[in-house]
Amino acid sequence: MEVKINKDIRQYSESVFFGMSMRQCIGTGAAIVAAVGTGLIFRHRFTEDVLSWLCILAATPFALLGFIQYHGMSAEQALWAWLRSEVLEPRMLLNRTNNLHLKDISGVLAQKQTESLGRTSAQQWVDRHLLRKKTQTQMEVESHDENPG
């Protein structure tokens, strides 16, 4: 004899009928009632194949309400959370950052932008290349100036 124990006690659900919880039984019962009701109401208006699809469409929401869980919430809790966040209390998210590095360097960036206005990309590349050469020669001069003794 083996007893199944869930690793997380919060995931425990008592089985009522055919291994389903009470919530799932109620959802399944409501889906059956919706399907049978739809079949009885529309049986003279549609053919059997269309009527079967109508019954499936009528039963689906009730069945889903019994079985769906989203982030640990039941279907109606998740639906209520969505309704509150999107319809009743929507909030506009703003992209406000507190980037201290950008604040510090913004002056340098503005200066570089004003220097580069009106210059072609080729001219900017030449300036960067010359600056790189200048810094390399300065580093070589500094390394030769060191007194080893």
Image (cartoon, grey):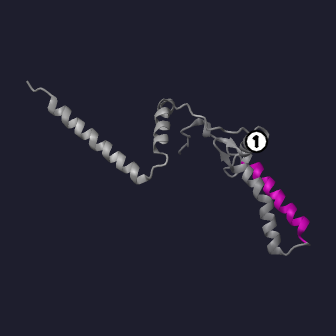
Q: Mark 1 = which residue?
A: 80
| Residue 87 at x, y percent in the picture | 78, 43
Which amino acid, mark 1? Trp
Q: Is residue 143 left or right of residue 40?
A: left
| Residue 52 at x, y percent in the picture | 79, 69
Count of all numbered marks drawn on residues in the image:
1
Question: Does the magenta run of residues contain 35?
Answer: yes
Q: Is residue 22 left or right of residue 135?
A: right
Q: Residue furthest front?
A: 118
| Residue 146 at x, y percent in the picture | 15, 28
Q: In the rendered view, tell whether residue 37 sits above or below residue 138.
A: below
Structural crowding at the residue carrying mark 1, measured as other residues with C-alpha within 10 Å and reported as few (<14), some (14–19) or many (≥20): few
Q: Is residue 10 left or right of residue 49?
A: left
Quadrant position of the C terminus in the picture: top left
Image quadrant in which you'd find residue 132: top left
- SS under mark 1: helix
| Residue 80 at x, y percent in the picture | 76, 42
| Of residues 56 and 30, the one drawn nearer to the viewer in this rendering | 56
Q: Is residue 96 left or right of residue 128?
A: right
Question: Does the magenta run of residues contain 63?
Answer: no
* Main secondary structure of the magenta stretch: helix
Q: Residue furthest left?
A: 149
| Of residues 76 and 118, the one drawn nearer to the viewer in this rendering | 118
Magenta range: 24-43
Residue at the (56%, 37%) spot, across then down? 8
Q: In the rendered view, tell whether residue 144 sits above or below residue 38.
A: above
| Of residues 12 and 16, the one drawn nearer to the viewer in this rendering | 12
